[in-house]
Amino acid sequence: MYPSRFSYEAPTTVKEAIALLSKANGEAKVLAGGQSLVPMMKLRFAAPQILVDINNIPGLAFHSADPDGTYRIGALCRHVDLEKDVELAAQQPTMAAAAPVIADPIVRTRGTVVGSLCHADPQGDWASVMSALGGSIVAEGPNGRRTIPCSDFVNGPFQNLLEPEELAVEATVPPPVGTRAGGYLKLERRIGDFATAGVAVSLELSGEQVVRAGIGLTGVGPSTICADAAAETLVGQALDQSTIERAAQLASDVSQPRSDHRGSEAYKRHIVATFVTRILSNLQPATEQAT
């Protein structure tokens, strides 16, 4: 199937892109990587009157840490940019674990991290990663910039809190208060498939003690789930068997899976608990090395 008829615009500045979005009265879509938008247009699940291609805007294809430790990902940073960053595992281990398992190599080459977040697919990987990290989306519009926590950004399947005239210019992760550790695991039927269930875990450690924690769940609810109670049970604790088991159970309890051709509700809850246990168990040596 072919997309419905649309106009194409290729602004060269953020200001110009925002002006185009403002004039479109909600009938425009932003094209960054296009790996989700274009298939939806071809199926006519999306039918924008105007396509605003931001690929000619300089200065958006970055990912780096500020001097204070804040990590920033520009709107044109591709999945593959993170996948091939040899320093990422030391700076952002949860991101480093997720980057190689996003979709397939073709999608990772063109798709963007911020675009994936804006797409708000309940089975999208980056939303749970950024939620676990306490990340935010920076939106720029006619009235300037505003920051939206990733935990609030998605308000339903394929829905986010961006205003029609706003452009998501970057995603940010706050500076660490301890040594970062974490991981991401997902169950997929085959390479490149959507997650049947996925778990992102981010910890910050002071010696053996967890001083900050976040757990995000993919594919087990109508949108990304922040397993806050599970994360909070880790804070102030060392990673021992009882603490890990408690966090795994709480994460499983807060998940909202539905039985389908990928598995039963009980099976998916079991996967969530198993993945939380596996990630945290693999991080136990890190706490021992930090002492």
Image (cartoon, rainbow, N blue to C red):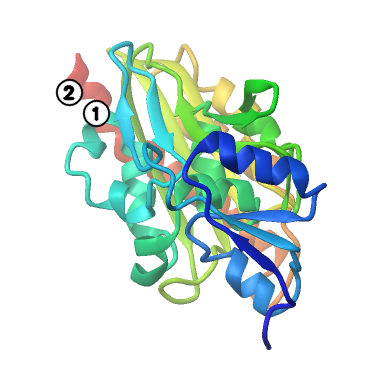
Instruction: Give x and y (percent) for residue 173.
Output: 45, 26
In the foreground, 128 or 40: 40
Amino acid type, residue under disc 2 in the picture: Gln
Query: Could you give the CA–CA distance between mark 1 and mark 2, rounded to whole angstroms?
Result: 5 Å
Pinpoint residue 122: horizontal percent, then vertical percent. 66, 54
Left or right of 102? Residue 290 is left
- SS label for mark 1: helix
Disc 2 element: helix
Residue 216 or 253: which is nearer the viewer? 216
Answer yes or no: do the residues labelled 1 and 2 have beta carbons within 8 Å?
yes
Query: In this view, which residue lies farthest toward the bottom?
Result: 1
Specify the quadrant that holds the C terminus: top left
Q: Which residue is mark 2?
A: 289
Mark 2 neighbour class, 10 Å CA radius: few under 14, some 14 to 19, many 20 or more: few
Residue at 74% x, 67% y: name it.
Answer: 46
Q: Is residue 82 left or right of residue 113?
A: left
The image quadrant where one finds the N terminus is: bottom right
